[in-house]
Amino acid sequence: MYEGVSSPIIHRPKTLSEFAQTSQKATSPLIWSGGSSIMTGKNTYPLINSNFDSIIYLGDIKELEDFQRNDRIAEFGAMVNLYDLANYGKNVLPSILLEAINSIGVSIITKRATLGGALSIVNPVTSIVPVMIALNASVELRYMKKKRFKNHWIQASQLIDKNGQISIPPKGLITKVRVGVSDMSTFGKFLKAGSYNRSPEETVFGAFVTHVNQNTLSQAHLVLTFPTVGTYTSRDMDNIFNSLKFPIGKDGESSLIKSISTFIDSSFSILPLQKALLEGFIEDIVGSLNEIALTEPNYAKGESYE
Amino acid sequence: MKIECVIDGKMLSLNLNSNKPLSLVLQEDLDNSTVNAHCRGRLCGLCAVLMDNEAVLSCMVPAFELNEKEIRTFETFQKERSMRDIERAYDEVGVKPCETCYQSRSIIIESLSNKLLERPNTPSEQIISELSVIDCSCMDTEDMLKIVKRVTDLKRRRNVRRS
């Protein structure tokens, strides 16, 4: 129907150095790692008023499909698909990451979606982003600077700019992702509320990770993502959790919800439905932490908080 | 862009827009009436085809990825023995998918039963969740599970007889 109107040039580099050469030559490329991003985007087919004229497909770069692990960390290439990630990492990855992967969809979808792609999609943001930030994952970012390719390991949280948007340098690429393996003393909670595919503007993703020491928390990290608005994370919000002593009552819970809502309102304007979903998530976290504070887990039997 | 692939057993050389979704290639360029949905990747699940013997949603596959791939749509799949097994299972369980999702559901059942042959210990919950990719409520989950298990059973028996 639209044949010959505007067909983007397809580049299929086989190595990262080939990718570097290709991206230098291409004027405004779309870097595609799989998944459905170019199929769901507006103006992608037929290509009218779009801001890219070529597609660089990363599926042929074998270097991006590596997976290795040791006692402390697991390192994945950006082109490892989410299905393989959930399967191979079943016993080592934190349960909230596995929950986030399963929340994306069934195998027919996760086999096509890749880790790098899930971290790079700007609008709407996927559920992998808040989880990776909450887990303090690091990513290897390869980008062009003064006509040369540089690579840096950065924290996943540094992918988010001050407006809560994912910001990767133009022609930049996530090549590897490193995440700590599952730890028994870590408590994690993941939230996916709403339908990401059908109404991303009403969806909320949340990830909460903390170390529980009897009735107090340390290194608490709450990350909230509103797929079409942005990702919110703040040290002040985390410090509120770190200063709490569990169990907390209804009053403590409502003042916690109120302060988190104030933080969110100061940065984003979200729908009342999203606010209600967020409150439910905080209540869920508090309920679980209260339960933990009132029951002593038996580490000898291998019980964990996850 | 020139693309060479095998679609429904025919070796084709197509001149297509490189980012045209497979669902539209089938509908517009090949007049395939068995793929009749194009939801622009919103995952309605009604455009499933088999790519290299594995079910994919055709609205998620861009044309440039088709090079040297083998695609089977319901048009040829309905004439295969596997489809007769699926129809037999529908009759035995006593339910059939509605007209809207019949093609897509049958292809996903085929893909799932092949997976179950390789991994017989796949938990039932996982099978049910895999079947939930189709956005149509015409069938009960318990019935769908029975159908997948029955199809797998029929295939396994045939494989035993062959060996």
Image (tube, coloured by chain):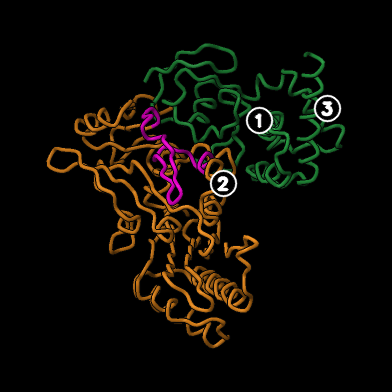
Q: Mark 1 points at which residue?
A: B111
Between discs 3 and 1, the one toward the N terminus: 3
Chain A drawn colour: orange
- Crowdedness of circle 1 by 10 Å Cα count: few (<14), some, many (20+)? some
Q: Where is residue A78 in the image (x, y as percent from the top left)?
A: 39, 40
Callout 2 secondary element: loop
Q: Nearer the viewer, residue B96 or B110?
A: B110
What residue is at 62 percent from the left and 60 percent from the top? A302
> Which chain did the renderer colour green?
B
Residue B149 falls left or right of residue A192: right
Q: Residue at position x 56%, y 48% from top?
A: A91
Q: In this view, does A293 lie to the left or right of A25?
A: right
Q: If the image is split into quadrants, where does the C terminus of chain A sit?
A: bottom right
Closest to the camera, between mark 3 and mark 2, is 2
Residue A181: say if magenta. Answer: no
Question: How much space separates mark 3 and mark 2, taking CA atoms?
Answer: 36 Å
Tell me the quarter of the image containing the N terminus of chain A. top left
> Which amino acid, by three-letter code, is at mark 2?
Lys
Is A272 situated left or right of A120 in this image?
A: right
For disc 3, the marked residue is: B88
The subunit carrying tag 1 is B
Which segment is the magenta one?
A: A59-85
Above or below residue B31? Residue A75 is below
**Is residue B17 shown above or below A100?**
above
Front residue of A42/A181: it is A181
Question: What amino acid is found at the position of numbered circle 1 in the picture?
Answer: Ser
Q: Where is residue A218 in the image (x, y as percent from the top left)?
A: 43, 72
